[in-house]
Image: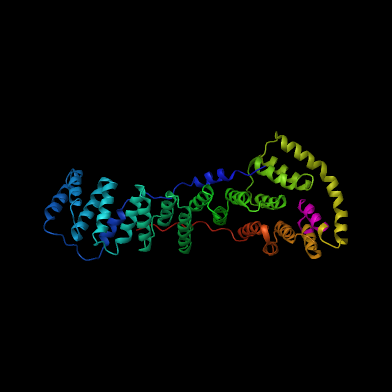
Amino acid sequence: MRFLSHLSLAVVLAAAGTLAVSAMPQEAQAAKKKDKGPKIEISKEIRPQVAEIQKAMGSDTPASAKPLVEALLAQPLTGGDQYVAGQLAIQLGSSLKDTDLQEKGINASLASGQTSAEQMPAFLFYSGNFAYAAGRYPEAVQKLQQASAAGYAENDIGALIAEAYFKQNKFQEGLAALNSAIEIQKAKGVKPSENWYRRGAGIAMQNNVNGASGTWTYKLVEAYPTGENWRAALSVYRDSAIPKLSNQENLELMRLMRKAKAMEGERDYFEYADAADPRRLPGEVVSLLEEALATGKVPSSSSYVKETLAAARSSVAADKASLAASERDANKSANGKIALATADAILGYSDFAKAAALYQAAISKGGIDVARAQMGLGIAKAGESNWSEAKQAFSSVTGTRKPIANFWTLWIDQQTTPVAAPTPAPTAN
């Protein structure tokens, strides 16, 4: 059995959509009104044209000013003349909702060298935003980065820079930009949008960015620990783990998925049941599949459930009857192998205290896979809600199990310190 495929999850996560904005440069006009820079002087040669444009803009047919503005912009203007021509284009473009004219006005104002320090960040942003909308992504990155460096922090500019990189198939650069945007928001005390994390995870997964899939799904579930996100994070880790997870390691992962309320449908329950094995851990398989049936996540008509549940139920009595002898043998044994196997069996019946004691005995006796025993001990302590000792056990796990232990620790932290609700971003004045 398998989880939802890596590619399918990528598509689901990427469904957050692109992060671009479609803002209009009214902010640039607002900056103009507040501008305290030096007065702009224009040459006497263009004053008649400016007067004619202003008259047309104030008439009942302001659209008649558009060819006049375009004619003015087409001239080889510099300095104040170019700046004023750009401002007229911005004003008329905003009135007519003509984004092409607005873009020409923004870029003319920037090229004039007369744009004040107060206006510059907003002008650079809107120039970059227009370039993005037109598909000129390298230009968009350049202008948006300049705007950010100049102090512009509105309209999710960091996410827009990331999206401009993604459009160029520069996925590592885009993910780095998106991560930077997230860290900036967090530093300001604003919780980044879940869509930012989902977009990063989707991009990383769809494009096989080295090492990024696990990183971004971990970020996602760390910030937004929903069952859906936990499922995505654990599934991505499982599918991308190198070396491939052993059956026992997969069981340790599935146990966390169940704890995190991230189990969905037949596929997950079948995966878990196969990892547990009705012959090895019949009690755990019975508990799991009965839960699946009770919640309706697996249909009672499933032949797999019928057969597996019957096999597990038929083994429970004999398995339980053998545990007392196994405990005695574990205590007598010179090494911890019997104690470890017995602890695994008892953990399957949710007898967490007894399982924890046997895992500790196995570790003390030695001759076993210590990382496996520490994982079992951590899971048993988590089952008791003994969070501090569970985290201590998980912190001792080394080797290929370490990422699984880290996921368990993250989940425990979320039980003891609930994730704060998002703080809305401040509204621009």
For the rendered model, the colour scheme is: rainbow
Quarter of the view holding residue 334: bottom right
Expressed as whole percent of the image width and height from the top left, the position of residue 255 reads 69, 51
Quarter of the view holding residue 372: bottom right
Expressed as whole percent of the image width and height from the top left, the position of residue 56 reads 16, 47
Expressed as whole percent of the image width and height from the top left, the position of residue 52 reads 13, 50
Q: Main secondary structure of the magenta part?
A: helix
Quarter of the view holding residue 332: bottom right
Say left or right for 86 vs 234: left
| Viewport quadrant of the C terminus | bottom left
Q: Nearer the viewer, residue 338 or 321?
A: 338
- Confirm whether the magenta stretch covers residue 105: no
- Confirm whether the magenta stretch covers residue 352: yes
Q: Is residue 23 visible?
A: no
How many circles with numbers are drawn on the protein? Answer: 0
Q: Residue at x 21, y 53 (%)?
A: 88
| Viewport quadrant of the N terminus | top right
Q: Is residue 400 visible?
A: yes
Q: Residue at x 43, y 53 (%)?
A: 165
Is residue 214 shown above or below 2? below
The residue stretch that appears in magenta: 338-354
Say left or right for 176 vs 363: left
Say left or right for 412 vs 282: left
Q: Nearer the viewer, residue 244 or 15?
A: 244
Q: Residue at x 54, y 54 (%)?
A: 210
Expressed as whole percent of the image width and height from the top left, the position of residue 254 reads 67, 50
